[in-house]
Image: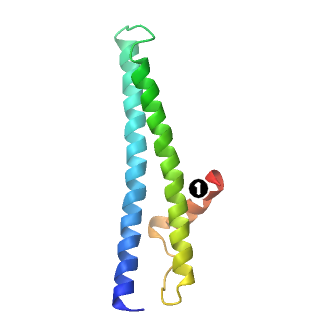
C-alpha cells in the first residue's frame, strides 16, 4: 500500500471514530439537558406546561441526533466495505476499541 493510501486510511479511521464519539456526546448532553429542564420544573413548582415548547423541540433534536447516529453507523459499515474491496489496504478488520463488533450490533438495530 502506498504511503498516501495508508495515511489517508489512518486519517479516515481516526476522524470517523471522533465523529461517532461526538454524536454520542451530543446525545448524552442533550439527554442531560432534558433531565435538568424537567427536574427544574418539578423542583421549582412550575406548572406542567412550563417550558413545554422547549422540551418538545429538545426531544425532536434528540431524535434527529439518534437518526444521525444510525446514519453514522451505516457510514462506518460503508467505509469498512470500501476498505475490504481495496486489495492494498491491510488491517481492515481492526476498528478502534472494538467498534466493528459494536457497529455490527448497531446495524442490526437500525437496519
Residue at the image position 54 percent from the left and 52 percent from the top: 70
Q: Position of residue 88 (x, y in %)?
A: 48, 90
Task: Tell me if mark 1 has few (under 14), some (14-19) or many (20+) residues whose alpha carbon lies within 10 angstroms of its own.
Answer: some
Quarter of the rendering occupied by the N terminus = bottom left
Residue at image point 48% right, 86% down: 90
Asked if residue 59 shows in the view, the reply is: yes
Colouring used for the render: rainbow
Q: Is residue 77 above or below residue 39?
A: below
- What SS does tag 1 mark? helix
Residue nearest the observer in this picture, 46 or 61: 61
Q: Is residue 98 above or below residue 39?
A: below
- Counting labels gives 1
Q: Which of these two is toward me, 97 or 2? A: 2
Rendered residue at 62%/52% (across/down): 110
Residue 18 at what x, y percent from top left? 36, 60
Q: Quadrant of the C terminus?
A: bottom right
Picture coordinates of residue 72, whole percent (x, y) = 49, 57
Residue designated by label 1: 106
Q: Is residue 70 left or right of residue 22?
A: right
Instruction: Identify the residue shown where x is 42% and y is 21%.
Output: 53
Q: Position of residue 42 (x, y in %)?
A: 40, 13
Amino acid at each position: 500500500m502506498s504511503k498516501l493510501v495508508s495515511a489517508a486510511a489512518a486519517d479516515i479511521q481516526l476522524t470517523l471514530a471522533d465523529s461517532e464519539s461526538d454524536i454520542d456526546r451530543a446525545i448524552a448532553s442533550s439527554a442531560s439537558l432534558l433531565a435538568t429542564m424537567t427536574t427544574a420544573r418539578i423542583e421549582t413548582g412550575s406548572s406542567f406546561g412550563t417550558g413545554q415548547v422547549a422540551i418538545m423541540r429538545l426531544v425532536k433534536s434528540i431524535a434527529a441526533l439518534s437518526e444521525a447516529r444510525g446514519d453514522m453507523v451505516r457510514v462506518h459499515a460503508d467505509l469498512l466495505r470500501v476498505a475490504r474491496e481495496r486489495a492494498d489496504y491491510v488491517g481492515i478488520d481492526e476498528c478502534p476499541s472494538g467498534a466493528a463488533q459494536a457497529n455490527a450490533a448497531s446495524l442490526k438495530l437500525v437496519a
